[in-house]
Image: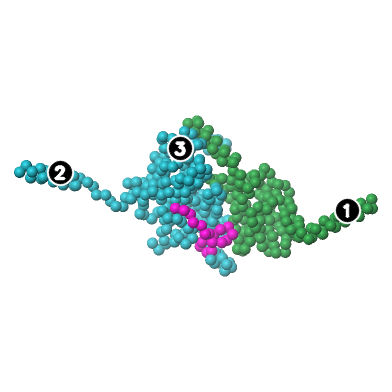
Amino acid sequence: MKKAIVVSFLLALGCAVTSQAVVIHWAVDAPLSGTSSAVLVYVSSGTPAYAGGAIATGVELGTAVSGLAITPLGIGEQATTDGTVRGEGGYYVVLFNDAHQYSYSSALAYNSSSAITADAMTPSTGVFSPTEFSQWAAVPEPSTAALLCIGAAAAALRRRKRV
Amino acid sequence: MKRILMFTAALAVAVCSRAAIQPIDGANAVGFAAITAPGIGSTIITVPFEACLGSGAAGMLSDLVATNGLTSAGDPAAADQLVVLTTSGPSQVYYYYWYQTGIGWTKITTEKIMPDGSLQTLTPPEANAFAIARGLGFWIKRSAVSATPVYVKGQISSAHQTTAINPGLNLVGYASLSDFTLNDSGIDWTGAYGGTGNTKTSDKILVVNTDGTFTEYFYFVKPDGWAAGYSALDHKWITSGYTLANVTIPAGQGFWYLRRGTGSFPFHLDGQRVSE
């Protein structure tokens, strides 16, 4: 009897430990006006940031949501898989508009059990639905980023020459 | 004279014997179904049968799931297991059974960690005393790589089958011997909740794929005033990207149903149409 209990404990523990991927359930009730797409981003610390046309701080997970999924009432429920085991940080919903701007939500803790599923036998029933978003900020284009780099390099050279 | 007496006696015995044989009712047909359940993984299965010689009655777990081709062992960790979702007081719990060599399906006593940190001991009934209603889903956890399907058996039911979907998570299945598509099967989805248009409030079906991942589908009811692009999705099961669900669930495979609407509703799992 005791052996069976211990074995079942070990089985449950084994399932939890070996589970690599987690599924994050998220949605948005009231996205910012003009939202044309959205994606889930993991950031170990700080907040998501973009540069050179791509994410500079964080990791985009899954594919961006667009089209009919951006409904008049918000973004419908999404299930995004993160195949990397996280020990800190949080998940953010990042919105984009057609003017190449982005906005990020409040965060979901990496280990929140309410909206994160790790095991098919115990699916979560909650959904991460952020209500607060940052102001729209421009996503620097690659050319813009390159110009900024050149400018910074030129400024550094000029300063060096003066010294 | 002797010959006539002998013949008469034999005839009388034959008539008596014939009279003693009960007629076999053709409705009692026993069936088998093979369900694909990959090795080293968990699959939700459902049994489309009822108890043998018990028309309308639920079969017992040990009778419904054949052990042919499954992995037995002297240790639960090395054996195939059945995991059945049930209720214990107000909460849902799992009961575990394992295929013990030489014995068959054997219950496992487990302990559940409660919110206050205490342990609740879960002692399942014996597998031959645990009734599983037709259309309920449960898990099979296979411990070894095997191409052998799982065989379920029982008496074929001629009755339409209805399963109550209660608020929260339900493990259910399509209690039929044919495959099941979420849309276009003529299934009566009256009672499924379409929410407000945002699928986060809709009823949801979670199908477990062979690699252990989920695919999720949502019931959608188009709110008034929404663009024409949503019309084709009205009263249908859709994906998270708001496209029509195009999924076939094999016969015998179960799924999670997350009920977000209020109250329960009767789910006609065997293709019963509204008009019937």
Q: Which residue is painted at 26% across and 49% down in the image?
A: B24
Residue neighbourhood size for the residue with mark 1, other residues' Cα within 10 Å, grouped as few (<14), some (14–19), many (≥20)? few
Q: Is residue B80 left or right of residue B30?
A: right
In the foreground, B265 or B129: B129
For badge 2, the amino acid type reads Val
> Residue at label 2?
B13
**Mark sitting on residue A156:** 1
Amino acid type at circle 1 is Ala
Residue type at numbered disc 3: Ser
* Badge 3 density bin: few <14, some 14–19, many ≥20, Cα 10 Å: many
Task: State the colouring used for the structure image.
Answer: by chain
Going from N to C along the chain, the mark reached first, 2 or 3, is 2
What range is drawn magenta here?
B233-251
Name the one closer to the observer, A4 or B114: A4
User: Above or below — where is B4 with respect to B203?
Assistant: above
Picture residue at 67% right of the left edge, 62% below the top = A35
Residue A8 shows in the view: yes
